[in-house]
Amino acid sequence: MKNISLAILFIALSLAGRSQYKKAGFFSKKGRSISVGATSFIMGDGKGAPHGFYYEGSRESSERRLFTYGNISIIPGYKFSFQTPAVSYDQTSEKNVTVSGKTTMHFLYQFNVGWFLLKQQNEERKFRPFISAGFNVLLAGRLKEVTYEDGYEVNKDVGGQSFSTGFRGGLGCIYDLSERFSLKLDGGYTYQINIYASSQNDYPTYNLFTSHTSVSLGVRYNIFSE
């Protein structure tokens, strides 16, 4: 009877150990994820909130709160409009005129480092909030067309080709639908800097891609490796 009891105890301990091993295996998952989604850039100043699409890749580990992600955003050409003082060519009159136009398609690269606010070692948790910080570089995008009243010279230039980069801080959350699929909501503010190689005059510049608040929502597919 004693031997049977010891055997039962040994089997129970073995099963418990195997269960803990599996659980530990779950907690030590590492991998990548790919995401696609929609994003909005709320710039204001006559540009409104252009919408775009993004493709994203990220790396994370269930053992660490730190993770990284980068994406390429595609922003279709958008319209802009603003008012500025203008002087007639013959210098006889001055008034405010409306300048309007459109941009070409923009391509924006962004890289971020994120930090999960809650510990990762919880397989029951579906909601994973995080904070993030990063930078962007505008890869392509320029002025396509601009119009204003004939016979006047405006006192503000529309920005041409420039080097544009920004620094971002934000927060978001990931909601796990299953082991493989998740929803990701990400928002933040970016301080954008535009640098021009040369300027034709001393007039202020109306930049086409400026500091902004961004909001994105996408679907993630998780690719794990032990």
Image (cartoon, rainbow, N blue to C red):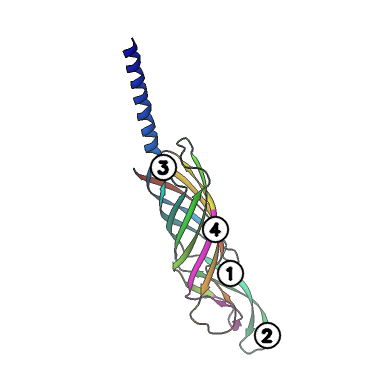
Where disc 1 sits, the SS reads strand
Q: Residue at x 61, y 71 (%)?
A: 82
The mark nearer the N terminus, 3 or 4, is 4
User: Which quadrant holds the C terminus?
Assistant: top left
Mark 2 to mark 1 CA distance (whole Å)? 22 Å
For the residues bearing labels 3 and 4, Cβ distance under 8 angstroms:
no
Residue 222 is one of the magenta-drawn residues: no
Q: Please give the residue where the numbered disc 4 appears in the rendered image.
A: 169
Query: Identity of the amino acid at label 3?
Result: Phe
Residue 172: image x %, image y %? 53, 50
- Give the amino acid type for the residue marked by disc 2 in the picture: Ser
Who is closer to the viewer here, 206 or 13? 13
Q: Nearer the viewer, residue 130 or 21?
A: 21
Which is nearer the N-term, disc 1 or disc 4?
A: 1
Separation of marks 2 and 4 at Cα, in angstroms: 46 Å
Q: Position of residue 10 (x, y in %)?
A: 34, 21
Disc nearest the viewer among 2 and 1: 1
Residue 131: percent from left, percent from top: 53, 52
Task: Mark 2: give few (<14), some (14-19) or many (20+) Cα within 10 Å.
Answer: few
Mark 3 neighbour density, 10 Å: few (under 14) some (14–19) many (20 or more): some
Residue hosting label 2: 93
Secondary structure at numbered mark 4: strand
Q: Which residue is mark 3?
A: 181
